[in-house]
């Protein structure tokens, strides 16, 4: 069928407009983090939110109240999950993929490339996009948990690697990682007041 009734078309238009306003308001409340640099977790929440909205718009038996209940529940769960992640490291690791060092001190880490299913060509492309002509100019390339590449240049005379805290660094048996690149359980660096 191509057409049921103008009443049904009007119902869909009104519900869609109302849900649009509700979703914009809820995302405004949820904050910029709900949309910026989305991780796999954030993509799942976004797709689920879109599915709820679409279902309510196109299913006559579902009401606007049903949509509000579902959207608000989803956003509340997302906020709770973010709160738990910020206060409890196991919750953070359960929800988000850990960043992966795939190049260290100019050397591609082939075993880690295989683990994250990326090629050396992808790492070289990230290095080039960051303005470097040689891997030897780069201290580290990290595949972040949002899928972005961080390319950190070598700095002469700098031994501060505090940005890599918690990441497995190859060949470090003295506090950051063992010789296989496995993360060791160490205390975080001291913070200045």
Image: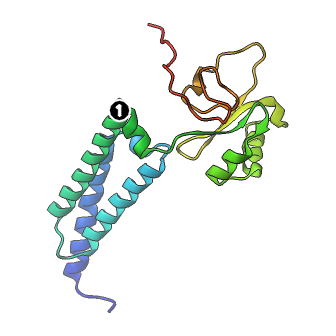
- Image quadrant containing the N terminus: bottom left
123 and 173: which is toward the camera: 173
From the viewer's perspective, is residue 151 above or below residue 25? above
Task: Say which of 23 and 78 sits in front.
Answer: 78
Residue furthest to the top in view is 193
Identify the residue at image location x=23%, y=74%.
10
Left or right: 160 as drawn, with respect to 60: right
Q: Position of residue 17 (x, y in %)?
A: 27, 62
Q: Is residue 81 left or right of residue 115?
A: left
The residue under label 1 is 88
**Quarter of the image with the C terminus in it:** top left
In terms of secondary structure, where does tag 1 sit? loop
Please name whichever residue, 82 or 95, is drawn nearer the observer in this view of the structure.
95
From the viewer's perspective, tell me whether residue 88 is left or right of residue 124.
Answer: left
In the figure, is residue 93 to the left or right of 117? left
**Residue under the point 62% across and 50% down:** 116
The residue carrying pointer 1 sits among few (fewer than 14), some (14 to 19) or many (20 or more) residues within 10 Å by Cα, namely: few
Return the x and y of residue 178 as percentages of the image width and height.
Answer: 63, 30
Q: Residue at x 49, y 19 (%)?
A: 188
Q: Residue 101 in the image: x percent, y percent? A: 64, 37
Residue 108, percent from left and from top: 76, 41
Residue at figure coordinates x 33%, y 46% from the top left: 27
Reply above or below: 53 against 61.
above
């Amino acid at each position: 069928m191509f057409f049921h009734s103008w009443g049904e078309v009007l119902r869909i238009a009104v519900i869609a407009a109302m849900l649009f306003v509700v979703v914009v308001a809820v995302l405004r409340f949820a904050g910029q983090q709900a949309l910026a640099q989305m991780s796999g977790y954030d993509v799942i929440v976004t797709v689920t939110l879109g599915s709820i909205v679409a279902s309510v718009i196109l299913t006559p038996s579902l009401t606007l109240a049903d949509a509000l209940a579902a959207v608000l529940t989803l956003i509340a769960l997302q906020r709770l999950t973010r709160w738990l992640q910020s206060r409890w490291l196991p919750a953070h690791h359960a929800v988000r993929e850990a960043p992966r060092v795939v190049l260290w001190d100019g050397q591609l880490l082939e075993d880690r490339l295989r683990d994250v299913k990326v090629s050396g060509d992808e790492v070289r492309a990230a290095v080039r996009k960051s303005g470097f002509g040689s891997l030897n100019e780069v201290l580290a390339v990290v595949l972040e948990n949002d899928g972005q590449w961080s390319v950190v240049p070598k700095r002469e005379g700098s031994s501060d690697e505090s940005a890599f805290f918690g990441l497995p660094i190859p060949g470090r048996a003295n506090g950051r990682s063992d010789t296989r690149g496995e993360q060791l359980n160490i205390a975080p660096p001291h913070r200045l007041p």
